[in-house]
Amino acid sequence: MRFIKTKDYEDMSRKAANIIGAQVVLKPASVLGLATGSTPIKTYANLVKDYQNGDLDFSQVSSVNLDEYKGLDRKNDQSYFYFMNDHLFKHVNIDPNRTFLPDGMENDAAKACRDYDGVLKAVGGVDLQLLGIGHNGHIGFNEPSDVFADQTICVDLAESTIQANQRFFASYDDVPKRAYTMGIGTIMAAARILILASGEGKAAIVKAAFFGPVTPKVPASILQFHPDVIVIGDEAAFSQITI
Ligand code: PGA
């Protein structure tokens, strides 16, 4: 694993966008694995800026997102489809027909998972997978568990995740309790992984995930076994590790 320590969130976001941008420049038809959450918001803003400056062209890019809430319509402003559109897709020249997320409105969980695995197979493998890390070590919505899921699954969100997400919803009852997520096996199959961590609140999990035992109780710990992982964190997120 390579660790890149940055001054702060802004610095982390610029460096992350530079790595994603370089991927697109080097391979215009890249398949990007994308993530939602607070952490990558500025990374996407930097990619939009680079596009507007004429430095990036997304016309041949395909994207597959990690996850989507089960039961939220794409028009719901808390859906991950809405997030991606709002922060990236509508601002750049990516082909909307080549942007993929699990179908949150597919009520048949087995079908939703099967369909998304079909999409992941059809795009032909992720070149660069962007990840955030949850306070409990989740990646995508792969919550702490007794096993690592291989392919797309429907998960019951951990109580801590529901509580962390509550800030975006009117009430606890409004927070979706289930989600579809790419499996750990699919994430691990990406050629390169870029994982971001920002702030003091992530310091303990950064240490546990990347310097502790590899265990499905800390899903991100599996990344220690991936041959090409870049961890970009700000000083606060890296405050409990020595690199
Ligand atoms: P955050 O979420 O970026 O909002 O902290 C990270 C995650 O849960 O993956």
Image (tube, rainbow, N blue to C red):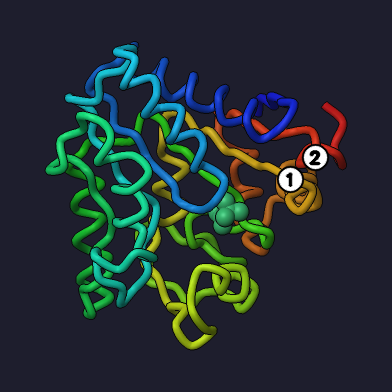
Residue receiving disc 1: 199
Which quadrant: the N terminus? top right
Judge from the rendering whether residue 44 lies leftward or rightward of residue 52; answer left or right: right
Residue receiving disc 2: 236
Res 206 quadrant in image = top right
**Above or below — where is 53 with respect to 132?**
above
Residue appearing at x 12%, y 43% in the figure: 97
Is disc 1 placed on a helix, strand or loop? loop
**Above or below — where is 40 with respect to 141?**
above
Q: Amino acid at mark 1?
A: Gly
* Residue 192 place in picture, x, y as percent: 47, 29
Which quadrant: the C terminus? top right
Most foreground residue, 4 or 125: 4
Whether the residue under disc 1 has CB within 8 Å of ligand 1: yes
Residue appearing at x 44%, y 83% in the figure: 174
Most foreground residue, 11 or 151: 11
Contact? badges 1 and 2 (CB < 8 Å):
yes
* Residue 129 place in picture, x, y as percent: 43, 37
Q: Amino acid at mark 2?
A: Ala
**Among numbered discs 1 and 2, the one appearing first in the sequence:** 1
Res 176 quadrant in image = bottom left
Most foreground residue, 171 or 242: 171
